[in-house]
Image (cartoon, helix red, strand yellow):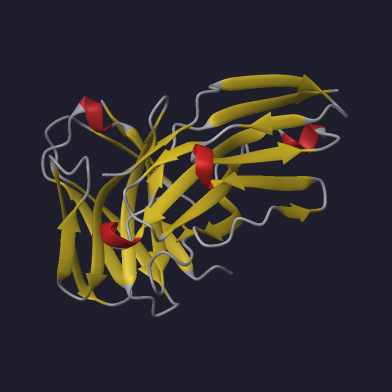
Amino acid sequence: DAGITQSPRHKVTETGTPVTLRCHQTENHRYMYWYRQDPGHGLRLIHYSYGVKDTDKGEVSDGYSVSRSKTEDFLLTLESATSSQTSVYFCAISSTGNYGYTFGSGTRLTVV
Amino acid sequence: AQKVTQAQTEISVVEKEDVTLDCVYETRDTTYYLFWYKQPPSGELVFLIRRNSFDEQNEISGRYSWNFQKSTSSFNFTITASQVVDSAVYFCALSAETSGSRLTFGEGTQLTVNP
């Protein structure tokens, strides 16, 4: 009911393969984010978007790229997956930034 | 730059005990926002509270209360009469005006409430 969905929910992939995770929202929010969650690190920002085709890097952006061609979709691509990218990935949306953030259910990615 | 520190990695209590989760933040901004999120074992992130830097009034919501002190850069969270369902990872987070809309998280505190 939150208006944000992530796909897939789970994925196992091999080292060196490209992987794309999708975040879809129905709230028409301006801001979208990708975070990764790892034990001992909390959630760390990978990339974020402040509008269609407007994106910027977060603190752990190496090895990741993003695209936002439509307001509702924010794609995260691992160009060549590595084992260090095994993590849980969360997408978030926000209408104004700073006010409130709604998170998706997460994608558990395992790179073998 | 902004930073959030949750020094307590794990806390274990017995049901009905009160427990306080600590959060210390760093930012040079005068306008900023503080958040607490709960992550139960199911994995989703549940929003608990948002507080802006100009509102130091403490807040109570049922068994939950929050103590915001700018003088010590802390935003602590207390659960009164804890219950097993409170078992979760709790995250404190910060968003500062000059950081755009980016939310910075602490490392999280794993709370276990035992029956």
Residue A107 in the image, given as x and y percentages of width and height: 40, 46
Tell me how many marks there are: 0
Which residue, as the protein is rendered here, is positioned at the far bottom?
Answer: A28
Quarter containing the C terminus of chain A: top left
Quarter containing the N terminus of chain A: bottom right
Residue A53 in the image, given as x and y percentages of width and height: 15, 72
Residue B4 in the image, given as x and y percentages of width and height: 42, 38
At x 44% / y 40%, what residue is drawn? B25
Asked where in the image residue B85 lies, by quadrant, the reply is: top right
Which of the pair B96/A99 is nearer the observer? B96
Q: Is residue B36 left or right of residue A9?
A: right
Above or below B17: residue B40: below
Which residue, as the protein is rendered here, is positioned at the far front?
Answer: B71
At x 80% / y 30%, what residue is drawn? B18
Which of the pair B21/B30 is nearer the observer? B30
Residue B60 in the image, given as x and y percentages of width and height: 76, 53
At x 53% / y 22%, what residue is drawn? B9
At x 39% / y 73%, what residue is drawn? A96
Q: Is residue A14 left or right of residue A11?
A: left
Which of the pair B69/A6 is nearer the observer? B69
Above or below B110: residue B39: below
Q: Is residue B86 left or right of residue A10?
A: right
